[in-house]
Image (tube, rainbow, N blue to C red):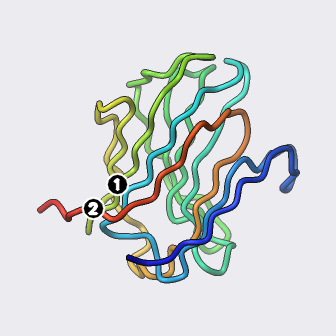
Amino acid sequence: MRACSVGTFCNSEVGEKMALRFEASCPQGICPGWSVIVKGETSSSENDFEINFLTDSGDQIAFHFNPRFAEGTVICNSFLSSHWGQEERTDTFPLEANEPFQIEIYSDREHFQVFIDDSKIIQYRHRVKHFSGITKLQILNDINISAVEISRRDMYE
C-alpha cells in the first residue's frame, strides 16, 4: 500500500474564484489501478465543481472532470504544456443540485473510468503516459464533500 498525504481545505482561495475543498498527494503516483471515490453534494445548481488529477510539477492536469449544471453536461479534458486539449463531453448528467451523489474515478492502463452512483458515464483515454508523475488529487469549487476514499483496486483487463 502506498502512502498518501491527505488534507482538507475549506474556503481557501486558489487562483481566481476557485475554492479548494480537498487535496491529497500520493508521491508514488495514483495511476493506474487506483480508485478515487468522492461522496458529497453540490450546494447549488448555479456553480460547478471539478475534480483534477495533477502531475507532480503541479502545472499540468492529467485529468479534469467538470460537471456543468447549466449545460447539463460533463466536461473532461487535460491541461498539458500550458494548453487545454480537446474537450470530451457526455450528455449523461445524473447529478442534481443539493442531492447527494457518489463519483468514482478508476484509472486502468488506458483510461479514466468515471461512474456516478454506480452508472458509468464516461471513459477518458489517458493523455499523460508517465503514470508515476500523476501524484495529486484536487477537488475545487461548489461542492460539499462528505467523504473521499483513495484505494488500490484490482486491474481490469
Q: Residue furthest left?
A: 157
Query: Along the horizontal axis of the image, is 40 left or right of 48?
Result: left
Q: Amino acid at mark 2?
A: Arg
Task: Give the residue pinned by disc 1.
Answer: 106
Q: Quadrant of residue 138?
A: bottom right
Residue 120 in the image: above or below residue 79: above
Which quarter shows the N terminus?
Answer: bottom left
Residue 124: x and y, percent? 36, 52
Q: How many marks?
A: 2
* Residue 5 picture location, percent across and down: 61, 71
- For badge 1, the amino acid type reads Tyr
Q: Residue placed at 72% from the left, 47% from the top?
A: 21
| Residue at the image point whose x is 67% and y is 18% from the top | 45
Secondary structure found at label 2? loop
Residue at 42% across, 21% down: 94
Q: In the rendered image of this protein, does residue 119 appear above or below residue 30?
A: above
Asked if labels 2 and 1 touch by Cβ distance under 8 angstroms, the answer is: yes
Looking at the image, is mark 1 or mark 2 nearer the viewer? Answer: 2
Of residues 64 and 79, the one drawn nearer to the viewer in this rendering: 64
- Label 1 and label 2: CA atoms lie apart by 8 Å
Position of residue 155 measured from the top left corner of the image (x, y, whole percent) = 20, 65
Q: Secondary structure at mark 1?
A: strand
Locate residue 74, reporting x and y percent.
49, 34
Q: Is residue 3 left or right of residue 142?
A: left
Give the vertical position of 24 relative to 13 (above or below).
below
Give the side of residue 46 with respect to residue 113, left or right: right
Q: Is residue 109 above or below residue 3?
A: above
- Disc ID at residue 55: none
Q: Give residue 153's mark.
A: 2
Residue in the image at 61% along x and 79% along y: 56
